[in-house]
Amino acid sequence: MSDTKLMERLSNAFGPSGFEEDVVTVIREALRDFDISVDPMNNLFASLKTNTGTRPIVMLDAHLDEVGFMVQYIAGNGLIGFVNLGGWVASNVPAHRVLIRNGKGEMIPGVIASRPPHFMTDAEKSSVPDFESMMIDVGARNREEVTDCFGIHPGDPVAPDVAFETARNGFLMGKAFDNRLGCYAIIGTLRRLNDAELNVDVVGCFASQEEVGMRGAEVTVKVAKPDLAIVFEGSPADDFLTDRDKAQGVLGNGTQIRHFDQSYVSSPQFIAYARSIAEESGIPYQSAVRRRGSTDAGRIHVSHKAVPVLVLGIPSRYVHTHYNYACPKDVEATVSLAVETITKLSPENINMLVKR
């Protein structure tokens, strides 16, 4: 059964790329019964206490960071210029609330400024804004007030200001489902494997800075040295964009098995193995072949001796914006398939998957 309170804490946690400390704190508390370590880059590693160090290693990956911004400069009138951390669409950004974390750790609310229609020409109303012209307004009168009263300076991180909630039909709404739902999936998988009899060692790797180039995973895979990996993602849903028969990320249709994206071509053997387990166990799943996008699998599958990777996505509407929707049944299906996939790994099918 889903732990909605934990999902809420993960979603609400402040954690743009490179500033994932609050997310790390939530995960440390959720996995306090596991062996935990954190590196200087904010990558977090969580291992089962039953690991022996002599068995094949399964790496569970999810990234900690969310798309956000960073303060670039403060103008004389008190408005704040910023750069984006991760892939935002410019038209989705103005007129939304944000939080700026100043050097004292204080969260300063602000609004991404938008020009009133009274001061716009018809051409400006139909044009797409650019990031270099956008500013954050914290309600200050001048630059000195921003720095002296609000304590804000260049380099301070910025994240969407959104509170998690549950809709009447049980759907989840909040920010950063890409990829806090993936983080939740690692936690749920580790918890359910804690007392299981396994033929593998399992390490959960929560990677930093995925949204700015999959940088954390480049480190975590070198540390974990996996034989197999499962990557969890808050994958973009498309059920609101197209016919449901064509859509490959439908809320409520189960975990999303990804075959291809810009960063990797999946392991057909690993997918066939996972699909057979899903069908045997009655776990709902859907398949996705993506024209664009990427995950940490792009770094993991080409590491050291080549690693077969299974990407399991939790469909999430409106990722890389302030507000996301997801279905808890898809979260549960994702965790269940990961658990069953790992518990049923035998020496024979491990050898088949890694082609020893």
Image: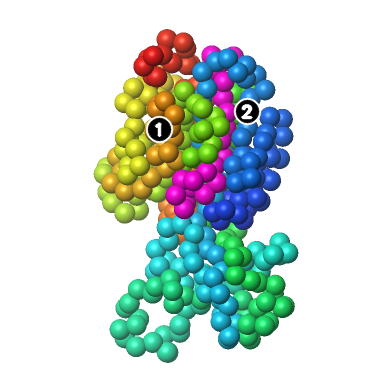
For the magenta stretch, what is the residue range?
197-216
Residue 208 painted magenta: yes
Residue 199 sits inside the magenta stretch: yes
Mark 2 is surrounded, within 10 Å at the Cα level, by few (under 14), some (14 to 19) or many (20 or more) other residues, namely many
Q: Residue at x 65, y 19 (%)?
A: 50
Query: Badge 1 is on which residue?
Result: 301
Q: In the image, residue 326 lies at what x, y percent?
A: 48, 47
Is label 1 or label 2 in front? Answer: 1
Q: Residue at 39% of width from left, 69% of height from top?
A: 91
Q: Quadrant of residue 117?
A: bottom left
Q: Is residue 340 above or below residue 19?
A: above
For the residue marked with disc 2, what is the amino acid? Ser
Which amino acid does the dot numbered 1 rest on?
Answer: His
Mark 2, residue position: 47
Q: Does dot 1 land on a helix, a strand or a loop?
A: loop
Is tag 1's residue or tag 2's residue first in the polypeptide sequence? 2
x and y, in percent, of residue 183 in the image: 56, 41
Q: Quadrant of the N terminus?
A: top right
| Disc 2, SS | strand
Crowding around mark 1 (Cα neighbors within 10 Å: few <14, some 14 to 19, many 20+) is many
